Image (cartoon, rainbow, N blue to C red):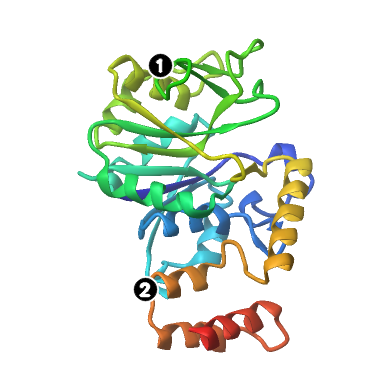
Amino acid sequence: MKGIILAGGSGSRLYPMTRVTSKQLLPVYDKPLICYPLSMLMLAGITDILIISTPQDTPIIEQYLGDGSDLGLKFSYRVQENPNGLAEAFILGEEFIGDDPVCLVLGDNIFHVGDQIAQVRHATQNIDDHAVIYSYYVADPRPFGVIEYEKDTDKVLSLEEKPANPKSRYISVGLYMYPNDVCARAKALEPSHRGELEITDLNKSYLADDKLSTVKFKRGSAWLDAGTPDSLLDAAVFVGAVEKRQGLKIACLPEIAFRLGYINQTKFQSIIDGIKDGSSYKAYLKLVLEEG
């Protein structure tokens, strides 16, 4: 399965922080925001990843992440000239996707799902002709895409984008898995009243064909959307609290690459050696190496 990180948008909700830098490189506690969705793909076993961003942000994201080889990954980059909707990712990424299924993760979404990552990894390895979307229970679903389930089952009855009167408190979060026909389906979409190709409309096309499955993230899992100042702060506080309590980092890319075998010990040591002394990040990586 291929992976796509959609890291576009103007960052207008985060202005003036985004006046001279990419939203994706703003810090969430101790690392840039883009590390979090990238870590989700890595943990799911996806190593070939396309990063889509704006004309001004793509070069600086590429400068930060490089080609992925340091992490045992392969990164490609593509520019989204205008914010034409999430589903446009599959049109821009058609050549990259090729004949493979694909997983899309939004660049401002943060996931901390514990042992459910095994369920996500299973889906990446066993996807058939069904799309798989992930849902999360929230207090106020009105700003999101809402999933209506049949009572006492996981059967999806309807999908609504930002409804005034939501039919449930389950929302679709920024993690989606699709079979290879997603590119053709995205091309067939009509722009919404906002002038965008909506991901909800794409998912509705699978629902209409009875080819939409969902996975509910369990109570106790964490999903955060870091697209506003308040949500960015909430995410930083959450990550900081977990890391300080456990002494283990969230979305530490070199650690994930090492523990999953994407890189060997020699490569991991070279990453450590390339970090300046005095960095708590370097001290943490050294501890990971010592503990094996």
In the rendered image, the residue lying farthest to the left is 99
Q: Nearer the viewer, residue 242 or 110?
A: 242
Mark 1 and mark 2: Cα distance apart in space? 43 Å
Quadrant of res 35: bottom right
Residue 263's x, y, as percent? 38, 77
Q: Which residue is mark 2?
A: 261
All told, the count of numbered labels is: 2
Residue 21's x, y, as percent? 68, 54
Which one is closest to the eye, mark 1 or mark 2?
2
Q: Nearer the viewer, residue 114 or 159?
A: 114
* Amino acid residing under circle 1: Glu
Say whether disc 1 or disc 2 marks the residue closer to the N-terminus. 1
Label 1: state its secondary structure: loop
Mark 2 is surrounded, within 10 Å at the Cα level, by few (under 14), some (14 to 19) or many (20 or more) other residues, namely few
- For the point 33% across and 49% down, the residue is 122
Residue 224's x, y, as percent? 64, 43
- For the point 46% across and 27% down, the residue is 199
* Amino acid residing under circle 2: Gly
Question: In the displayed structure, would residue 104 be above or below residue 192?
Answer: below
Q: Which residue is mark 1?
A: 190
- For the point 29% across and 19% down, the residue is 210
- For the point 28% across and 45% down, the residue is 97
Question: In the displayed structure, would residue 146 be above or below residue 71?
Answer: above
